[in-house]
Amino acid sequence: MALDIKICGLRTEAAVAAAAARGATHVGFIHFPRSPRHLSLDEMAALRPAIPAPVKLVVVLVDPDDALVEAVANRVRPDILQLHGKESPERVAAVKALSGLPVMKALSVGAAADLLAVPRYAGAADRILLDAKQPKGSDLPGGNGVAFDWDLLAGLDPAQPYILSGGLNPGNVAAVLARLEPAGIDLSSGVESAPGVKDLRLIHALFDAIGAASPIERTVS
Ligand SMILES: O=C(O)c1ccccc1N[C@@H]1O[C@H](COP(=O)(O)O)[C@@H](O)[C@H]1O
């Protein structure tokens, strides 16, 4: 099965081009003013033409209201919305209906019990993304470069596809792919030289590591 690879928090044409050229299937733009990766709607719309087909654009929102969902859908025209806040399954379904877009719902994992939420969201969301919990002292619900205990995934229904996120980087991605079978991986701070600053060498190192990985047979599309 092909592995989806999403590089998130991109802010420049050069970073979009590098990620796309090396095999990213998805690129992510963050709209969350507290994030060092935040882009305004105008900035996202301006960067959108730099994304070559068939790479998909994911816009990340945190507990957006209806007006923001509509504005992003109409002005930025993403392929997918990622909800990275405390949205309920009902709110996920409402955002999907309002935007007319597929929705990826991020769920935070810190203990086995957190995975009990997955079946409740799986009916409403098109994709489930599993990320670490927000660390104490952090102002951000994601993009903290922190991994959760991947052993907890043993408690997940093996038939449930998930995107793995949180603390992935060029140094650990091969170990992840040797051990787990996510439908995709998603990373942001692991390919940055400073918060919000993507490092093209780290993007290349990431794809080199993915290409060199793989006891579990995979295709990087
Ligand atoms: O990256 C951010 O600033 C961010 C802000 C608000 C919500 C989500 C955010 N990022 C998401 O966090 C995960 C993992 O990030 P990391 O690789 O651990 O740095 C990823 O899904 C991003 O989309």
Image: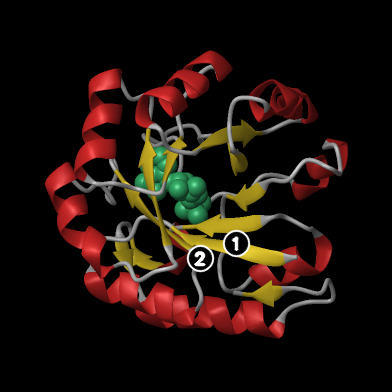
Instruction: Report whether residue 202 is seen.
Output: no
Question: Is 30 situated left or right of 136 in this image?
Answer: left
Q: Mark 2 touching mark 1, by CB under 8 A?
A: yes
Residue 170 pos. (x, y %): 57, 73
Q: Nearer the N terminus, badge 2 or badge 1?
A: 1
Residue 103 is left or right of residue 213, and the answer is left
Comparing 72 with 7, the one in front is 72
Residue 164 placement (x, y as % from top left): 64, 51
Residue beneath the point at 38% across and 42% down? 60
Q: Please provide percent x and percent y for residue 153.
A: 80, 43
Q: Is residue 5 left or right of residue 160?
A: left
Task: Determine the image quadrant of residue 107.
Answer: top right
Above or below, 76 relative to 201: above
Judged from the image, the secondary structure of the residue bearing numbered disc 2 is loop
| Left or right: residue 195 compared with residue 3 | left
Q: Which residue is mark 1?
A: 4
Residue position marked by numbered label 2 in the rendering: 25
